Image (spheres, coloured by chain):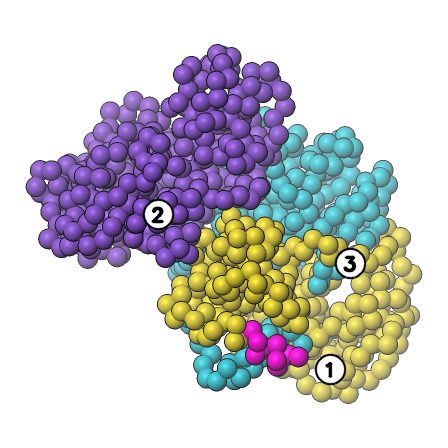
Amino acid sequence: MSYALIIAEVRRGVFEERNLDSAGIAALLGKEAVMLIPDGAYEAGNIAETVVKVKVAEEVFLNPLNLKNILGQVFAARGNPDLIVFTHSSFGMESAAYTAGAFGFPVVTDVSGYDKEKGVFLKSYYSDKIFGEFKASGGPVVISVRSGSFKEFAVDKAAKAEEMEGAAPVETRTFVEYVEEEKADVDITKADFLLSVGRGIGSKEEIPAYEDLAGRLKAVLSGSRPVIDKMWLPKPRQVGTSGKTVRPKVYLAMGISGAFQHIAGMKDSECIIAVNKDTEAPIFQYAHFGIIADIHKVRDKLKEIVG
Amino acid sequence: MNILVFAKRVAATQEEELRIRDEGAAVDLSKVPFKINDWDNYSVEEAVRIVEKTGGTVTAISIGDAESDEVLRRAIAMGARDGFLVSSGEIFHDPGVRSRLIQNFIRKENIPFDVIFTGVQSEDDQFGCVGGILGACLGLPYSSMVIGIDAVEKDHMIIRRELEGGLQERVKIAVPCVLSIQSGINEPRYVSIMGIRKASKVERKVFQAADYAAPASAGIEVVRWTYPEKKGGATMLTGELDTVCGQLLGILKEKGVFQ
Amino acid sequence: MPEQTATRVLTCIQCGKCTGGCPESGKTPFNVRMLMRKTQFKSDIEESLPWYCTSCGACTIRCPRDVKPSEVVIELRAKLVEDGDIPLALQKALENTFVQKNPWGRSRNKRADWLEKLDFEVPHVSGTESKRLLFVCCIQAYDPRCMVIPVNVARLLKAGGMEFGVLGEEEACCGNEIRRIGESGLFEELQEENLGSFTEYGVQEIIALSPHCMNALKKEYGDTGIKVVHYTEVLAKMIAEGSLSFPGSFEKKVIYHDPCFLGKQNGIFDEPRAILKAVPGLELLEFSRSRETSLCCEGGGGRMFFEVESVYQRNAEVRVIDAGKRGAEIIAAACPFCVMTLEDPATEKGLVVKELSEILMEVL
């Protein structure tokens, strides 16, 4: 039977929103979707025709070695799918590769597009500078999909509930515990969202107000060299060639004109938003979005809206 | 502990404007410099640090053309004992092909190991698959996104996997195993040119990839190379302060960094 | 440490003249004299210390026993480089230079991009009659702030009727800072690559834009038989001979900052001043510390690429304050590193920093 098997990504009881992209590509390909999910009270929504609850704990399900055995059971019961879909996440990357290896299936990771006419998957090369069109043959293709790429294609489906017993967990790899990253020393290179301030903030007295904004936006505060030089922010918060190179999802630069040494440290950020009152500030050449305004006014307005 | 580390020589494209040749048939890398894959650099460093503590050896293996010898010299300068080049002029876009080649090489040459390290992914194709496929093919336990190795025992290791949003997962994994190392697990040492010159005196063995090729019934192939959709310069958000700030928050929500 | 260096260190009499002239000793944990002492006794040296040195060369010039402390510091760094244990930012600069032939890791294919800003063609050096090479080097080739220097100098040379060419993408970093960071192996590779080009194209003369490059090409590339000059030497001569003159007027009070690698290390004090004096309307001022005693801006010795651990008042700021006291409106420097380090504090204090060629372009 022709179907797409979606391996749901869950973590600590939460059904990840990224799964919408997995459902989206199944819908885009016109496949009936069967979604595997571990035992637990997940808000999985109605994004697949069938939702199969595998009666194993989350940590067992998220282990590629166990998943291999579970998939073996699924294939035996339902036949091979046409497509096996993972999210492109820490879990998905690991398990997509292992699944492909275990069953001898072709695999394409970080899929961000699909050309229906040609039947090819679009995959990033060289940090999105080039994309390759990939054709798979010889078996169900295993893919991991890039977050945000297919969710628009997801549609409401019946979500018929089924259950299955999971194979006994393996002993060669076992979950021990979760570890929260130590918060004591903030590592700006690990942040998804950086609020970065530059000379334009004017004085040290303004720092607490930006810290407050960062807190409300759940961003990490960083700065350009002049700010660190003046000791308005500590050295580990410096972005630039003489500080740290960062690649957050969003880099919100306020009052940073964009010296070359600074740009080199942040230009690979996924989305750069620059706020500066100087229309000629070089940072606007690198930013995806720009706002020409008084940064303090923008700061205060944002606080007002966010509350 | 004997560790095999895979190191790939990749095009350093971060600063380059890449061109596609022959109507999508190839990417022109003729003027691009090459270097060791960043993730593999962390892997070599981690392997060297482990054997410095536990004893044993690090063997660096590279699959690629003759130029890939450069990354082997570098790995030896970092502390690897041996360097093996599995020589091939071909670029393997299918990670399955690469993994099965490695599997055959290890088996045929009977290369002993306790642990195999690969980088989580390589900078050029960003597939992130070679370690996982290899682990499954060898029938060994596997973990990717390894951001910390807390304990190394004879029969198992305690490792930490990097998850999303600053969360990590501690995992016990049996040895032998395959681990894909995440960048940031350590701070790789600087490898001086003098060090590389000294390492050049250590003999590197060369094998021919053709001897280990594995016919596969399933696989993937690149049909065509394309450019991403063009983004213009900065989109300027204009209007009243209220509107502009609202738009800004909208972007933050869309990017998933603010709810 | 090479035997020669070790022997020289043994002759140190701990007179402290080095420390007295050092721009870092006193205000930072760095103390040149003490480093020499510890080297004599082969005692352990805290790893962060050698990185404070800016390679200004004051110690070496002042030393009565020819110990060459600044060279000893390079050897101390070399040991750390060999051990692979160096500040991350410097590691990046070295790795970038290895891959892309410039410390910022910018694409080598973009090294000649500055030429697009010219409205005339500059030939490859091989296509010139004179085989005179304009050596651009990294910061001028890539940094938008410093990219104006080659553009300006090319225009000035053309105005003076001088033929010259470039190496374009074939040029590699001169290696001056790389050698001072202690990575002699990488320096040798860069030297070999550049010398290969010089020989292949029969280069007879080199005009360097940065004093740092001039220093390396002139004094550290061995006996090349190639005449190496700084661009200010060429322009000063043109002005003296009357082939270059400035019709415009620049009614400003300008203070000239002597770059270490141009002044104290290579004795070029008068040419930049002669050029500035030839600018109509310009009033030339002097710092309280000028010429041989000029205060280092702290941009040399790898310090452009990383920050030292402790925080203290920057010399650039001291310099700007002094310039202000002297009544200067503009600080002129003939070195890209000086321009970069001085500009930050100057902007804050309402002063303008101009590379010498920028002033000349306003009156050409």
For label 3, the residue is A180
Q: Quadrant of the N terminus of chain A?
A: bottom right
User: Which chain is assigned cyan?
Assistant: B
In this orientation, which residue lies closer to the viewer: C312 or A54?
C312
Instruction: Work out whether A31 lies above or below C210.
Output: below
x%, y% of residue B250? 58, 79
Residue in view at x 15 percent, y 54 percent: C249
Q: Does the magenta stretch include residue C162?
A: no
Which chain letter matches label 3?
A: A
Residue B202 falls left or right of residue C19 = right
- As rendered, which of C108 and A256 lies closer to the eye? A256
Q: What stretch is highlighted in magenta?
A: A299-307
Q: Is residue B209 left or right of residue C315?
A: right
Looking at the image, which residue is at 52% across and 33% down? C26
> Residue A100, position in %: x, y?
71, 60
- Give the letter of the chain under mark 2: C
* The C terminus of chain A: image quadrant: bottom right
Task: Give the answer, above or below, for where C198 lies relative to C255.
Answer: above
Q: In this view, does A43 lie to the left or right of C64?
A: right
Q: Where is residue C162 in the image (x, y as percent from the top left)?
A: 14, 42
- Badge 2 is on which residue? C325
Q: In this orientation, which residue lies closer to the viewer: B163 or A93? A: B163
What's the distance in space between the residues labelled 1 and 2, CA to CA?
72 Å
Asked which secondary structure carries label 1, the reply is loop
* Res. A47 mark: 1
Q: Nearer the viewer, mark 3 or mark 1?
A: 3
